[in-house]
Amino acid sequence: MLNNKISVIIPVYNGENTIKETIESVLNQSFTDFELIIINADSTDNTLSIVSQIKDDRIKTFSFQKANVAVNRNRGIKQATGDYITFLDADDLWTTDKLAAQYTALRENPQAGVVYSWTNCIDENSRFLRQASRANWNGDVYSNFLLDDFIGNGSNVMICKNILIAAGGFDESLTNAQDTDMWLKLSALTDFICVPKPQILYRIQQNSMSSNVIGLEKSNLEVIQRAFAREKAKSLQHLKPIAIGNLYKYLCYKVLAAPPGKQQNAIAARFLITAIKTDISLLFKPIIFKAVLKLIAMIILPPNWASLVFQKLPQLSNTSTFLGYEKTA
């Protein structure tokens, strides 16, 4: 028989600026039967001091050597005693009803092993930026995941622990896209259920928007190859070009959204050309005009001038609409 306890796992490395607010968003949950497992990955700032000042018997802190997020989540899974597991990045937040709503959804839908909610994006000061995906896929969602990671972040899902163990945990060899790889593995094993309301507040850090986009490209392509090699994808091979096209639209957004001076312009141009090759209809979309104009500005203008232009023309320089052209069928 399942117990009611939820294990919340927060991996953290040098999270002194956000960890207190993140922990408080867990402690403020209306559902109270949980343990909060903090995996400290050898932080060198004041993270541990801040955590130690928060007095709550449900908090359990473990310290390890620095490692990637997949390793740290797996460390948390090994410490978890609950039959439901959910993850929260050290700079993200939840609404107060997140645990209660997701727990109820899993209890009312025993055929589902994973539940997810909707996400809103916030800035460094926790102010609303924009909505993220409003997907409402339920049941067998493997084909949906082949085309798009509609979960969007690692702070979202709640998973039945036995399903998570059956999936083999997070792949520690991947440098990026560990979340997408896990959602695909889970959707090959169990049904998903959606709580159709925004409950995750995902923090956008502008200084990290373009970090390691080559690694992001490599890992995502590897995950796509794995996903289409599974028996479950045998009849879905026609979706592979669409999946690759969606990836390059996402990569265009990532590299073009970074502050001027940090973009790798040649890489941005390659991503843009590849996205167009995989979906020629982009040539007739307004986003292409904005993307090309922004890329030219980044190439020919000094970073401070480019920043000024983008501040004066925010609608023209906003390329987040790339995500709206990702195909779902």
Image (cartoon, rainbow, N blue to C red):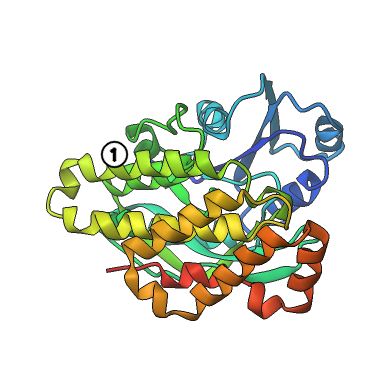
Residue 234 vertical placement versus 219 (above, below)? below
Q: Which residue is mark 1?
A: 226
Task: Classify residue 106 by image quadrant.
Answer: bottom left
Q: At x 28% / y 61%, what residue is drawn?
A: 139
Point out the image quarter for the N terminus.
top left
Report if residue 69 is visible in the image. Answer: yes
Is 102 on the left-hand or right-hand side of 202?
left
Is 164 on the left-hand or right-hand side of 235?
right
Point out the image quarter for the C terminus.
bottom left
- Farthest residue to the top: give it: 65
Is 200 on the left-hand or right-hand side of 223?
right
Q: At x 43% / y 31%, what residue is drawn?
A: 171
Q: Where residue 264 appears, x then y in whole percent?
A: 61, 48
Is 215 on the left-hand or right-hand side of 194?
right
Q: For the residue labelled by badge 1, is the local secondary structure a helix, a strand or a loop?
A: helix
Report if residue 116 is visible in the image. Answer: no
Q: Where residue 75 appears, x then y in whole percent?
A: 55, 26
Q: At x 33% / y 70%, what residue is drawn?
A: 280
How many residues crowd mark 1 within 10 Å: few (<14), some (14–19), many (20+)?
A: some
Q: Nearer the viewer, residue 247 or 317?
A: 317
Q: Nearer the viewer, residue 114 or 1?
A: 114
Residue 328 vertical placement versus 213 (above, below)? below
- Farthest residue to the front: give it: 300
For badge 1, the amino acid type reads Arg
Q: Nearer the viewer, residue 317 or 208?
A: 317
Q: Where residue 266 appears, x then y in whole percent?
A: 55, 50
Q: Where residue 87 appears, x then y in whole percent?
A: 56, 44
Q: At x 23% / y 58%, what residue is drawn?
A: 239
